[in-house]
Image (spheres, helix red, strand yellow):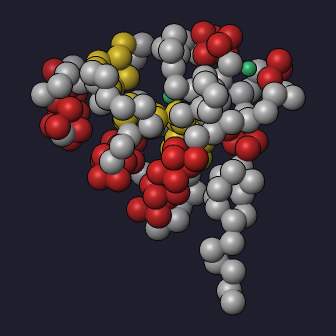
Amino acid sequence: MDGNNDPLGDLSTNFWKWEFRCPCQKCRRIKVRVSSLLLFKLEMVRMTFNDKPVIVLSGNRCEEENKRVGGFPSSKHIPNPDGEASDIRIKGVKPIDIGLAAEKIGGLRIGIAKTYCHLDVKSPSPSKFWIYIGNKIIYSGSIENESLLKFYKIVMGEK
Ligand SMILES: [Zn+2]
Ligand SMILES: [Zn+2]
């Protein structure tokens, strides 16, 4: 037995509660709650990139923290009861490439920022993709929901 499939993290094989904890002072002792579906998808993203570590920049956020970072009011980062969103980055991988991998995995809404990729497991309503440009966010419509790459090219071309 080589034990390669043994869970290491305390949330899933490769993810730990501390990575998803709301960074504010008030939440220090609050339970970290992350959707197991999201964790499963994040493990799949990690596998796509040959098990390169997925760095979680933002997981759970309380309402105050979400406001502080300028998050969407009903953000999936806010546990209800579980957090269903994460902002991630993988060293040496462009956010758009993380997004395209996530699109292939399916069942994810995808936000592309300059330095990270937002993933959440909420169903598209109506947008499935969005792109952060400076402090603006451009959302996909139902037609653009069919291809992240197409949408990305349209948005980046228009800039
Ligand atoms: Zn907090
Ligand atoms: Zn996010």
82 relative to 18 in the view: left or right: left
In the picture as drawn, the residue positioned furthest to the right comes out as: 29
Query: Which residue occupies 54% across, 34% down?
Result: 84
Decide which of 72, 136 is in the foreground and name it. Answer: 72
> Residue 24, relative to residue 36: is it above or below?
above
In the picture as drawn, the residue positioned furthest to the front comes out as: 81
> Residue 115, relative to residue 55: is it above or below?
above
114 relative to 31 in the view: left or right: left
Query: Which residue occupies 65% across, 56% down?
Result: 12
In the picture as drawn, the residue positioned furthest to the bottom comes out as: 1
Residue 64: x %, y % from top left:
68, 11
Query: Which residue occupies 16% across, 29% down?
Result: 144
Q: Is residue 70 visible?
A: yes
97 relative to 31 in the view: left or right: left
Residue 31: x %, y % from top left:
79, 33
Decide which of 15, 116 is in the foreground and name it. Answer: 15
Residue 6: x %, y % from top left:
69, 72
Decide which of 36, 127 is in the foreground and name it. Answer: 36
Q: Quadrant of the N terminus?
A: bottom right
Query: Which residue occupies 38% across, 40% down?
Result: 108
Residue 148: x %, y % from top left:
23, 38
> Residue 40, relative to residue 58: is it above or below?
below
Q: Is residue 91 visible?
A: no
Quadrant in which residue 135 is drawn: top left
Decide which of 112, 77 is in the foreground and name it. Answer: 77
Q: Quadrant of the C terminus?
A: top left
Please give the count of numbered marks on the rendered protein: 0
